[in-house]
Structures are given as structure tokens and as C-alpha cells.
Amino acid sequence: MDLSAGLPVLLLLLWSLAPQARSLRSHSLYYLFMGTSQPDLGLPLFEAMGYVDDQLFVSYNHESRRAEPRAPWILGQTSSQLWLQLSQSLKGWDHMFIVDFWNIMDNYNHSKVTKLGVVPESHILQVILGCEVHGDNSTSGFWKYGYDGRDYLEFCPKTLDWRAAEPGAWATKVEWEEHKVRARQNKAYLERDCPEQLKQFLELGRGLLRQPVPPLVKVTHHWASAGSSLRCQALNFFPRNITMRWLKDNQPLDAKEINPKDVLPNGDGTYQGQVTLAVAPGNETRFACQVEHPGLVQPLTVSWEPLPPSRAMIIGISSSVTVCVVFFVGILFLILRKRKASEETMGDYILAECG
């Protein structure tokens, strides 16, 4: 597998495994694990990052075997019992991850060693696990594996089994489902330990966890060979959970009529998302985009507003004037340049003749 894309691509792959929708009043605790079978290529054998409400608060890697605080509200807790439990959990997950990694590679026959004693190609394993506490105090958990950039296995706490995302995962699914003790431990973590830990972290970070940042919402109109469409963009918001829907004549549209895009990180701690909708030409003003987010006191509704004819004409004239000015400035520049070159040539000629 080509690993030249590096860590940002891995993060995006991991992020794609995360739940895409969340109640606006919920809180989350989750961990992202990643590793490569050949750590000498610049990626770690195992690295973990923990998030509370999408904010990074702890990191860990196989080389240091130490949990490092990454948020101000956790810095003063590195000697507490909570931090000790977290550190031990990360060390345990480090061992579990490597064992699972080689198990999966064995089932794909990817761990075969060459005569030189090395694995012929590198592979990547990603894991996301965690829980959410919803506004009604109910909880839900998730535990997913991705292998070489594709969904692989997902744990189902209610049935204590694994759901295979592709045929190649079936052998691992059957093997892991034989370990009933591990399945019960996974269920206990997702349904009991993780929510309790999340509530402790929320209490520690009360007033210090990042405040919600409302989205900047705009609706634009686009023409393409396929026809007319409206695009609603929500920009620079935090936290990640957001609801975007289209309204037609102030009534919600059926979800099947909407083409949603994934919510993506901006790289500065904020997020962006968009939804697009195909519309019949001339009907654009009947539609509006409604956005709900923790940073908004109430849902925000934004419509596309076509430019008035007079303003559109002014913009058109201004653009034409700008083009003309640039054109004539360019011509004038060429004339002056040629004139200067001619003068320099003539000067040289006269000078030579005087010599």
C-alpha cells in the first residue's frame, strides 16, 4: 500500500469511520487508533488520540508508551486516579491493537515474511471506539475497524458479534466471535465505563472546554450541464455536530431529494459542511437552507437571493470597464516598451557612427 500521502490522509480516513450524525445536545468521548506494519516508513506502529466533544485532550504512541495531556483542563489531572486509569487503558489498547493487526494480516496472508526476514509491503489499521451521552441521558457506543483505508469490522454491543464490511473480513469476524469474554468486555466498556469516564471529563472541563462557534451559512446558485442547483455551505463552526436541511415553500424536503456532503475538518479546530440540491430553473427562490447547531440560539434559515437587474448590470459594466482598462494598459505598456527599445537601438547606432 502506498503510504506517501502521510498522516493527514490517515486522519481523514479515520474521520470517515466516525459517526456522521449526532444529537445537538449530546456529548461524546472517542479514541482514534492508527498504525502501520512498517513503522520505519515514517508512520507509527501504534498511535492514539482521545477526543471529548471533538476536542483533542490526550495522545499516546507505542514508542514513548506515555499518555500526554493535550488540553488545558486535563493538565492538572496527570496525577489523578482518572489519568492513571486512562494511561493504563491506552497501554492495554496498544497491546490489543498490535495483536489484532497481525491477526488481520494473517487472515489476509499479508504477514508472510520474505527470505530476507521482512514483510514485503506495508499495511495500515485504523480503529475508532467511543460513546455518546445524549440529551435524554441515554447512551450509545461504537467500535469500528478500518484496514488499508476501507471499512473492515464493526462491533455490535447488543448482539455481541461483529459485522463484516467486506468479504475479506469474514475470517476475522468468525475468529473474534469465538472470544465471548472479550465481547462482553467490549460491551461493558461502551455501555458503562466509557459514559462514566465521559461524565468525569465533562465535569473537569466545565467552563474550559471550547465554547460553540456558530456556522457562517451561505447559499449559492450553480449552473452545470446537468441543470441548475443550489449549494448550502456552513463554514467555520464548532463543535462538529450540525444539522442541515432544505426547505421548499418553508416545508422540509424529503431526505431522498438531498445530496449531503460529509462534514470535514478545516485544520484549525473548526469544521465545514455543505448540502446541494438540484432545482428546476426559475424555482430557486422557493427553496431555503435551514441549519441547526449548538452555537445557534435557534435554527438559521438562509435563502439564495438573486442580484437585482440594476446591480447585475452595474457588475457587468464594471467588469467590462476593468477588462478594457487592463487591455488598454497592456497595449500602452507594449507601445512604450517598443519605443524605448527603438530609442536605445537608435542611440547605439548614432554613438557608433560618431566613433
Image (tube, grey):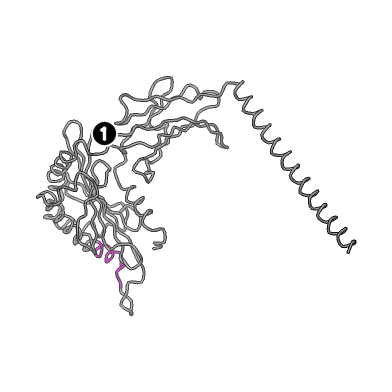
Question: Residue drawn at (31%, 31%), measured in percent from left and top?
Answer: 295
Give the position of the C terminus as an image quadrant: bottom right
Relative depth, front residue between 179 and 272: 272
First to last magenta residue range: 101-112
Query: Looking at the rendering, which quadrant does residue 100 occupy?
Result: bottom left
User: Total of numbered circles in the picture?
Assistant: 1
* Vertical order, 176 against 21 (above or below): below
Question: Residue drawn at (12%, 44%), measured in percent from left and top?
Answer: 192
Classified by dominant secondary structure, the portion drawn in magenta counts as: helix
**Residue 243 placement (x, y as % from top left):** 34, 32
Q: Is residue 47 left or right of residue 341?
A: left
Q: Amino acid at mark 1?
A: Ser
Q: Is residue 52 magenta?
A: no
Q: Which residue has dot 1 on it?
A: 23
Query: Looking at the rendering, which quadrant does residue 275 occupy?
Result: top left
Relative depth, front residue between 344 and 269: 344
Give the position of the N terminus as an image quadrant: bottom left
Residue extending farthest to the right is 353
* Vertical order, 345 against 157 (above or below): below
Residue extending farthest to the front is 355
Q: Is residue 104 magenta?
A: yes
Q: Is residue 27 left or right of residue 124?
A: left
Question: Residue drawn at (25%, 40%), measured in percent from left and top?
Answer: 53
* Vertical order, 104 against 141 (above or below): below
Question: Residue drawn at (39%, 39%), measured in percent from left and top?
Answer: 272
Label 1: how many Cα within 10 Å (few below 14, some 14–19, many 20+): some
- The answer, for residue 231, to whether it is visible in the render is yes
Query: Looking at the rendering, which quadrant does residue 258 occupy?
Result: top left
